[in-house]
Amino acid sequence: MSATTPTHPTVHSSISINERYILTQAGSWVLVFSARWVSEIFRVPRSRILALPFYQSPLMGVTHHNSHIIPLASAHHLLQTEENTLRETVTILKLSSAAGTLAHMGIVVDKTLGSSSQDQLPPAILTTPSRHPQDTNSMVLFQTDWFPPDLWHPQR
């Protein structure tokens, strides 16, 4: 009987996670996230979102997911667009620790569209901090500075 070492295929990619982007939709806008900032994408029924009435408007509530309480922000509010339809189930992108002070927060979007490499995106979205940049085909890169510094302080 001969012992053989199992071999596992090696996957080589010329594009690192630092150069990948996740594309989501919020109304008519495509909201683009750096893949290193997203730790998980999941869906929850809207009925499982608990509202936070005494916090600033980017925070829409919290939900329980995998034994953690996840604070949620609406992509529609961040992009200053109107949410036309309230879906029964929402799509959430949970931010990773690479997102700094927004780590472990969830961003509620209409849907995920896929992923893209940096060279497939319009160059203007990578260089402008604007929420509604020109010449980007309605694409905008998610920015952590869209959130106020006192986001986590209750308002009365």
Image (cartoon, helix red, strand yellow):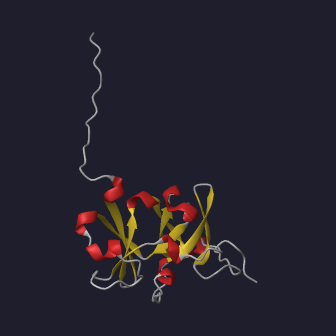
Residue 21 shows in the view: yes
Is 87 placed left or right of 114 in the picture? right
For residue 84, which quarter of the picture? bottom left
Looking at the picture, does residue 52 appear above or below residue 85?
A: above
Residue 79 rendering spot, x and y as whole percentages? 45, 83
The residue depicted at 26 percent of the width and 70 percent of the height is 121
The residue depicted at 35 percent of the width and 54 percent of the height is 17
Q: Judge by depth and name the residue closer to the eye, 110 or 131.
A: 131
Q: Which image quarter holds the N terminus? A: top left
For residue 67, which quarter of the picture? bottom right
Looking at the picture, does residue 18 appear above or below residue 12?
A: below
Q: Judge by depth and name the residue closer to the eye, 31 or 83.
A: 31
Count how many numbered circles sit on residues in the image: 0
Q: Which image quarter holds the C terminus? A: bottom right
Is 14 placed left or right of 84 in the picture? left
Residue 150 rendering spot, x and y as whole percentages? 66, 75
